[in-house]
Image (cartoon, rainbow, N blue to C red):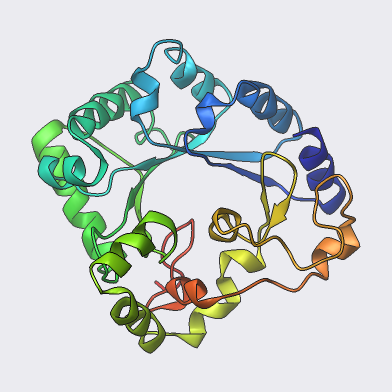
């Protein structure tokens, strides 16, 4: 963590994006946020929401608020059945409970406390138009639960890990890969997240994105660790790519910040 903060300082990086699993579970996460805040970095944390109901995590929301941590929360649909089907029974109800607590703290309401929700399709298809879906989310969550959020992010499912295994078992992998490649949009390339950020794993290994991290595809450089990389080497690296990268370039594009072409 200290090495990452130092590299950020050396390169003039001003944004720290924390993800997991559940990044709240890292025993040093609060220290990292505090130090990043001292460096006047913009801090984003990606939460699954339900972790904030677990014993020992009750103080995280006020801590996030104190340090103006922007939150990106997973809510793959605005309906109970779809969320519970994707993430497990009871997840929707717990997620709504946490979102209500976040609203009470000012998240999604006050401009300095942004709360973004994340949608991803339930199967092998491209996400719908982000703006249109955001309007639906906003209306449904307000009408049904009185909830507010700042904006919606749509992310294309990347054919790796369990999702790839499920596609292969359903004999849909080739069809989905063909869908992604046929939808390739060259206009997405300049803003791909791998061109503007770098992912640091728990052991300091550097990756061009979180998907490459999941695949254990480190940056293409002789120095691949946060402890040995230099700013010059990092900026001159060649980005590691494979067929899964077509997910980020399909249609309107996909990144950790949502679609690339509005």
Left-right relation of 2 to 212: right
| Residue 244 horizontal/vertical position (percent) | 48, 72
Q: In which quarter of the image is the C terminus?
A: bottom left
Q: In which quarter of the image is the N terminus?
A: top right
| Residue 102 horizontal/vertical position (percent) | 35, 26
Determine the residue located farthest toward the front in the rendered image: 169
Left-right relation of 247 to 10: left
Left-right relation of 73 to 2: left
| Residue 20 horizontal/vertical position (percent) | 51, 39
- Whether residue 77 is visible here, answered yes or no, is yes
Q: What's the residue at 13%, 40% (across, down)?
A: 80
Q: Quadrant of residue 42?
A: top right
Q: What's the residue at 82%, 39% (across, down)?
A: 3
Left-right relation of 90 to 52: left
Counting labels gives 0
Q: What's the residue at 55%, 54% (across, down)?
A: 214
| Residue 9 horizontal/vertical position (percent) | 83, 44
Q: Quadrant of residue 175?
A: bottom left
- Whether residue 105 is visible here, answered yes or no, is no
Q: Is residue 201 above or below residue 185?
A: above
Q: What's the residue at 57%, 71% (across, down)?
A: 191
Q: Is residue 218 above or below residue 116?
A: below
Q: Is residue 25 above or below residue 227?
A: above
Q: In which quarter of the image is residue 34?
A: top right
């Amino acid at each position: 963590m200290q090495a990452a903060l130092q590299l950020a300082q050396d390169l003039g990086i001003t944004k720290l994006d924390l993800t997991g699993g559940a990044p709240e579970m890292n025993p040093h996460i609060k220290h990292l946020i505090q130090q990043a805040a001292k460096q006047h970095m913009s801090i984003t944390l990606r939460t699954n929401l339900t972790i904030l109901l677990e014993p020992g995590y009750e103080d995280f929301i006020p801590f996030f608020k104190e340090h103006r941590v922007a939150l990106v929360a997973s809510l793959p649909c605005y309906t109970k059945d779809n969320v519970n089907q994707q993430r497990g029974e009871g997840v929707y109800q717990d997620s709504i409970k946490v979102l209500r607590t976040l609203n009470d703290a000012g998240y999604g309401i006050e401009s300095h406390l942004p709360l973004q929700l994340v949608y991803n399709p339930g199967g092998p298809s491209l996400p719908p138009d982000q703006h249109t879906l955001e309007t639906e989310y906003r209306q449904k969550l307000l009408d049904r639960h009185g909830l507010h959020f700042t904006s919606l992010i749509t992310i294309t499912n990347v054919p790796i890990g369990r999702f790839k295994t499920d596609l292969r078992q359903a004999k849909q992998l080739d069809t989905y890969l063909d869908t992604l490649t046929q939808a390739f949009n060259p206009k997405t390339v300049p803003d791909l997240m791998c061109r503007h950020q770098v992912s640091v794993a728990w052991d300091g290994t550097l990756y061009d994105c979180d998907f490459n991290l999941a695949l254990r595809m480190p940056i293409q450089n002789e120095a691949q660790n946060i402890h040995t990389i230099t700013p010059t080497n990092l900026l001159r690296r060649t980005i590691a790519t494979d067929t899964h990268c077509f997910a980020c370039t399909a249609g309107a594009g996909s990144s950790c910040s949502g679609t690339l072409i509005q």
